[in-house]
Amino acid sequence: MEKHLTLPLTEEIVKELNIGDIVYLSGEVIQLLSPAHKRALEYKKQGKELPFDVTDMAIYHCYTSLSTNECGLNCNFLGASTSAGVNLYEPDFIREFKVRAIIGKGGMNQATLDAMQEIGCVYLAQIGGCCQLVTEAVEEVTEKFWEDLAANLGIKITFKNLGPLIVGMDAKGNSIYREMQAKIDAQKQIIYQRIGIA
Amino acid sequence: MSITESMIAEAGERLYIQSLIELPSDVTDRFKEMREAEMSELARFQLDKILMNADRAFARRGTICQDTGISSYKVKIGTNAKIDGDIEEALSKGTAQASKKMPTIPHSVHPITKINTGDGTGPHTPIIHYGTLPGSDYLEITAQPVGGGGDLCSAVKMFTGSAPFEDVKKFIIDTVIEAGSKPCPPTIIGIGLGGMFESVNTLAKEAVMRPLNQRHPEKLIADLEEELLELINETGIGPMGMGGKTTCLAVNIEYGNTGTYILPVSIKVGCWLIRRKTARLYNDGTIEYL
């Protein structure tokens, strides 16, 4: 099933998505990696206001190459980084900020899946390495936050039809990655037998 | 006439940039072959998009993947080549120039302080491997920058010489399964077998750089490459770990003799995006890009 969605998203829209669906996403997305997650959660604890609003919005685990031109910020290219690196912070982040979609690659852990089900949030997987397909969906880069975090800073990017993104984990407790793990574990025993390992 | 430092820097820069933009044709051929045999619709969809992305990168002269890697070169020195200048200085300059000419994300950081030099260079960066070309009057340089996703999943293990070979196969299968979706499968696996600790990883790197359609010249090793490829593709991991038969594009093995009491094994897990671009630099000042 292919769906074109525009941010902000609601819990209802997110709950209609199933693992394996193909999504194209339009609107403002915040690039956030692990250090920016950590800082956002610290701000929340201290009652400090964040420089961006992610409630009902989407965040993207990605690296970006930016430059400045006469129109302001320009995105040379971007692409998903491995989401497993954010597993530590994502469950709290989803609960605290009610974010509706996490974009990345490679999937996330059970604790994140639980938080997604509780709040109503999905994991959208970019096809790893497909930098050109996602860069061509960039309309503009509007803001940078926390530049002291160097390459891990936060960036606000407006996309038109960012995709294809594959629903890897849905808001109903299903995860392609978890299903795959069970299948792979079963296959592993067959492969062991073939190579003569008891 | 001689091969000057500026020629080497120029080749180093151009090869690095080209390697980020152009997917080698043996890789696209292999993608197409495996796509035909793939049963999963979601897997086929992803394989098609990966090739579409590579076409767009080529047309726009942009990078295929956002991970523009750590700069690495293989330098083969012809024994009749006349080199005027420092090869390492020149390739460092070439890497720095490349990061200015083309947008890249320089990842070269100090291992403890994490301070980024900003131009992709630094101590032992670019990484340079050397070899010789007996009787040749040229220098052959291959840019082979390496991304982080695959290396994070790579592994090396020292077996005893008496370990049954099944244990080595198990180590390879376990490494691929443990990597799962993380190295952006379909992967290209390079295996170094034998040698000693100091050489086994270089063998694995040599292996992963070999074109995917070339099997090892020794039948015993070639058969092992095919057997391991078949076993890995039985895991069902599939493109991006979302299921399918296309988990690995090729298993390449390079070996060296080792001690009777030890068997070093290195597994270089590479993503589908192998980067390799080669040029020959001649004594008469010409550069031939292959």
Image: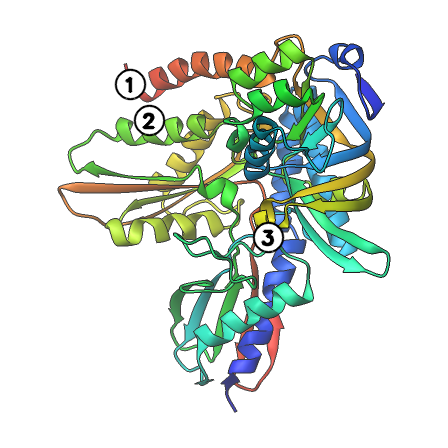
Q: How far apart are marks 1 and 2 (CA)?
A: 8 Å
Say whether residue B26 is visible.
yes
Q: Position of residue A21 (x, y in %)?
A: 74, 18
Q: Which chain carries label 2?
A: B
Q: In which quarter of the image is the C terminus of chain B?
A: bottom right
Q: Mark 3 lies on which chain?
A: B
Q: Residues within 10 Å of mark 1 (few under 14, many from 20)?
A: few
Question: Disc 3 marks which residue?
Answer: B68
Q: Which of marks 3 and 2 is nearer the N terminus?
A: 3
Q: In this view, does A44 lie to the left or right of B135?
A: right
Q: Position of residue A24 (x, y in %)?
A: 80, 28
Q: Contact, CB < 8 Å: mark 1 with mark 2?
A: yes
Q: Is residue B235 left or right of residue A147?
A: left
Q: In this view, does B247 lie to the left or right of A161?
A: left
- Tell me if residue B91 comes above or below residue A180 in the rendering: below
Q: Is mark 1 on a helix, strand or loop?
A: loop
Tag 2: amino acid: Lys
| Residue situated in front as seen by the camera: A194 or B66 | B66
Question: Disc 1 marks which residue?
Answer: A197
Q: Are marks 1 and 3 on the same chain?
A: no
Tag 1: amino acid: Ile
- Residue lying at 29% horizontally and 53% vertically, measured from the top left: B199
Question: Disc 2 marks which residue?
Answer: B170
Q: What element carries label 3?
A: loop
Say whether residue B245 is visible.
no
| Residue situated in front as seen by the camera: A151 or B107 | A151
- Residue lying at 50% horizontally and 71% vertically, measured from the top left: B91
